[in-house]
Each structure stands twice: as C-alpha cells, then as structure tokens.
Amino acid sequence: MSKLFESIKINENIILKNRIIMSPMCQYSGEDGFPNDWHFQHYISRAVGNVSAIIQEATAVVSEGRISYGDLGIWKDEHIEAYQKIVSAIKKYDCVPGIQLAHAGRKASTDKPWLGSKHIPSNDEKGWQTVSSSSVPFNEGYEKPHELSIDEIKELITEWGKATERAIKAGYEILEIHGAHGYLVHQFLSPLINFRNDEYGGSFENRIRFILEILSEMKKYVSTQSIWVRLSASDWAEGGWDITETVELCKILKENGVEVIDVSSGGGVSHQEIDVKKNYQVPFANEIKQNVNIITGAVGLIFEAKQAEAILDNNEADLIFLARELLRHPYFALDAAKELGVDLKWLPQYERAKNNHYA
C-alpha cells in the first residue's frame, strides 16, 4: 500500500483520507476580503481532484493584514456567508476544509504579483499604513512600518480570536496560524526583525509570546477543530531564526494543543540566501518530526508522486503539502495513485476516463 494514500488521524474528529494537502496559495482575486466565483472553482476543483484537505490561502484577520488589496479576509461577520458556500462544497468531496489566518505586517500593502508586487505607500488610495514588531521596513522599497504598542498587540490578538470564531461559523475544520514567510507572526519570532526591548522582544521566550497568546485566544473558540501552524524553520540568514529555535517552539506549541506543523522556510529578510533545490525544506520537517513527535508536513519543490512517497517512506514527514504543483495539476492525486499502483475511486462523472486515455 502506498503511504501517500494511507489515511491519517489528526484528532478524534478529523481523519484525512490521504497525505496530500493543498498548501495555502494567495490568489489576489478578492474584493474587500470577499471570495468570489474564482475562489469557488479554484478550491472545489482540487477537492474533486482528491486532495485530503485544503488550507485556504492567507486570510487576513484585519483589513490591514492583507498582503494586497486583492487578498481574502475574515475581519467582519459579513464574510462568513461567502465562505460557507465554499466550505460546504469542499466537504461534499470528502475533503477537509481549512483556513490560514494571517496578518502580513510590514509586508502588507502591495500590488498584485502580475502588476509587479510593489509596495503601495499609505497615501495611495489602494495602500495603508503597515505595522510590525519593530519600525524597520522589509527593504528600501517599503515604507517604514508602525511599531505596534502593547495595547495594539492585545487588540490584534483579540481580532485573531474573532476571526477564529467566524471561521468556525463558516465551517472550517482546520485553523492554521500563518507564522512563516516574513509576515507578522514571523516578524515577532525573528531576531533579525524584532528589535523590541519589552516583553515581546529580546529573548526567545519573549519573541514567541505573540504566537502563544494568539494560540491561547483561538482556543477559546475551538472545540472539534484542529489548530495547525505554518512556520519558517530558518531565516536562511546569519543570526536569524533557525531550526533550533523552531524545534523548541514546536515543543511548546504541541504542549498547548497544536496538532500539525506545516514546515516552510525563509521570507523574513530580503538578504536571505536560500539553496533552492528539490526537497530543500524536507530536512526541516524531518528535524521537527524526530525531535518533537508531532505530525509534520513537508512542502517546497515537491512535484512527483514517487518523490512524495519517498519522503513518507523515509519517515521524514507525515503529510505532503503541494503548492505550485496543484496550480499546474489540480488532479495530481488521481495520476499519482495510478503511478503508485493504487486503485483510487474516481467520481462517477469521471470514471469512464480512469483507465483508458483513448476510448
């Protein structure tokens, strides 16, 4: 039996039918935070393609937390109904709906990628004032962010809780904290970004306080749902956040109820030096899995069925998060099953195409 197509129990309420997860990927196609027909077809096609869970793209807990003006959001009750339609359809195909709750911090207020991704200044009608752990911009192309006060941090934590409540009302079963890629949570974790001298800066214990307080607030609303965390395991820069600190944080996250670590890396500082190659982030997932004994997901240049199978066979990770490969190939799971000799059940509408490409 292929490990890629083995089920896995996350908790008493969530069992994934296989190990293929749709990784969160921004579509930059919303308006005022609302999803639309594009998002519906984008997510449902992958559910039809037999992934076991979908983690919806970074969804902002406040409007200023969006990367771009086209990002999704869940900062007001009016958003709930629009997501219910997507969630309901995902569940029809035995796929678990998840959402990534996020705040972009100093990397917010940018244009859409196909328009150049440039930072939009706060005095532009499409821009806004960014915030961060410290008042240091991402690079020279960005405005100086506002350093969050203690009261403002507490307000954001409260908003994360409200967003969690809305997500649960919408029907999401997986709630992922975005703590990676140089966005706000990562901006508190990394000593290359966080220069505070209060209880949210300096020591490791202080730098992890923000994410732990977010987690605590989210748990007030969670019952049967599962909390996941996406982390950048390394800043890929000298003196930055690294795998040693990541492992220690993951131990604490597990003790506080997190059930899955979604392991990525980088994105924190513009001077990072990443050795990008096939499986380049898998060793980070393996390090966490072996030292924390928590369910881990591997991501990053994974695009072949046998490659994914080998990661699982080698016990380097428990889940395979696919990003760009699912943009290229929504039905990756169907072809992967065939390649790995798994007789996967297809939907009846597509069954006649399963075994014969020509008839």
Image (cartoon, helix red, strand yellow):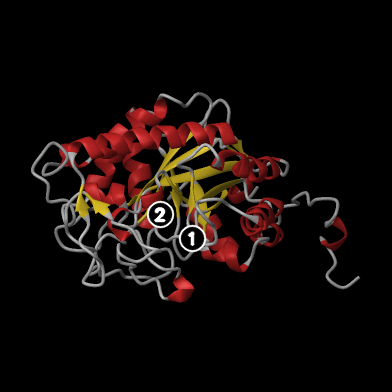
The amino acid at mark 2 is: Arg
Image coordinates of residue 281 in percent, x first then y, are 38, 59
Residue placed at 63% from the left, 58% from the top? 42
Q: Is residue 305 visible?
A: yes
Query: What is the C-alpha distance between the residues marked 1 and 2?
Result: 8 Å
Q: Which residue is at the front of the view, 353 or 105? A: 105
110 left or right, relative to 331 = left
Determine which of the numbered discs, if any, sits on residue 340 in the image: none
> Residue 149, position in %: x, y?
18, 41
Using the image as rendered, state which of residue 142 and residue 310 is in the foreground: 142
Q: Nearer the viewer, residue 43 or 146?
A: 146
User: Tag 1's secondary structure?
Assistant: loop
What x and y, as percent, mark residue 292?
A: 33, 38
Residue denoted by label 2: 66
- Quarter of the image that includes the C terminus: bottom right
Q: Which residue is mark 1?
A: 70
Q: Is residue 304 visible?
A: no
Residue extending furthest left?
197
Q: Amino acid at mark 1?
A: Gly
Residue contact between numbered discs 1 and 2, judged by CB atoms under 8 Å: yes
SS at badge 2: loop
Instruction: From this view, report whether residue 248 is shown above or below residue 21.
Output: above
Image quadrant where residue 333 sits = bottom right
> Residue at coordinates 65% horizontally, 60% vertically from top-left?
336
Residue drawn at point x = 52 percent, y = 30 percent: 225
